[in-house]
Image: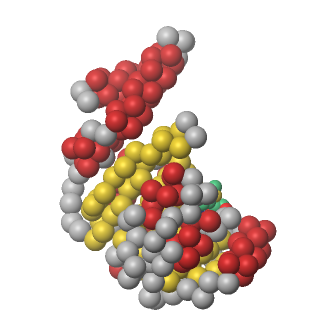
Amino acid sequence: MEMNSKLSSRLLAIIKYVDPSDIVIDVGSDHGQLAIELARSNAAQRVLASENKRGPFKTLAAAVKHSQLTNLNVMLTDGLNNIPADINTVIIAGMGGVTINEIITRKTAPITQIKKLILLPHGGAPLLRKTASELGFCLIAEEVIKDDNHFYELLVFVPGSITYTSDELLFGPINLLKQSPNFRLMWEKVYEENEYILAKPLNPKRRKEIEALQERIKTL
Ligand SMILES: C[S@@+](CC[C@H](N)C(=O)[O-])C[C@H]1O[C@@H](n2cnc3c(N)ncnc32)[C@H](O)[C@@H]1O
């Protein structure tokens, strides 16, 4: 199916991890671009686009109505609260890692019904690798995406039991194996930014932490 070229490369990267049998929720859908494209191209069986705030929800509902797609619905809900029991694929993109972490660890999150978790945080990937593995998920794919001069880490989890090493949590087990150009560029950028920070006055504890991270980056 032809893809919508108006989608950012960040959102386009998600689509290839969605299967036609998946019943998807796009949490924090905002403009609805990804959800609409997934439904329009039949990349998923059905899509639920959600928002937790009335303003963005109204805009989202209008965009979905305008699309006239019958395999696409909207829901006003916070995170994964009260989602339908047949949802098996969760996409959460464009939020901070801490916010995503809070959504997936809530006691009310229906973790046992989720067969695939696709996360594309603004930072905080190590925290999400740790949390998802503790929740009984393992990574099946990782990508580092460059979009608009920013790097984003895409994480795809399925149910599975695994314990990651501290290097795997920090860098990503699949990223470490693949060593993609974007992965290397992202960590080179972090290394350079840290060198700039270390050249300035810094409290000793923070300096030690950054120096330790630099040593780990050097091993890549
Ligand atoms: C920056 S936008 C990202 C939109 C889109 N997912 C993307 O990646 O381009 C984040 C959206 O998540 C919504 N949001 C934040 N916390 C949420 C939550 N707990 N439940 C549902 N939506 C949430 C916000 O209202 C906002 O529209």
Quarter the C terminus occupies? top left
Q: Position of residue 163 (x, y in %)?
A: 21, 56
Question: Where residue 182 sits in the image (x, y, percent)?
Answer: 39, 38
Tell me: 167 left or right of 144: left
- Residue at position x 73%, y 79% in the image: 66
Q: Is residue 178 above or below residue 58?
A: above
Q: Is residue 98 above or below residue 21?
A: above
Q: Nearer the viewer, residue 137 or 210?
A: 137
Q: Which residue is rendered at x = 40% and y = 31% of the image? A: 185
* Residue located farthest toward the front when viewing the structure as drawn: 2
Question: Is 176 rendered above or below residue 32?
Answer: above
Foreground residue, 19 or 127? 19
Q: Quadrant of residue 50?
A: bottom right
- Which sits in the foreground, 6 or 2? 2
**Residue 102 appears in the rendering:** no
What residue is rendered at 32% in x and 28% in y? 217
User: Which quadrant would residue 119 be assigned to in this image?
Assistant: bottom left
Q: Residue at (68%, 64%) from the top-left corner?
A: 31
How many marks the image carries: the answer is 0
**Which image quarter: residue 81?**
bottom right
Task: Let me know if residue 64 appears in the view.
Answer: yes
198 relative to 72, above or below:
above
Horizontal and vertical percent position of residue 34: 57, 66
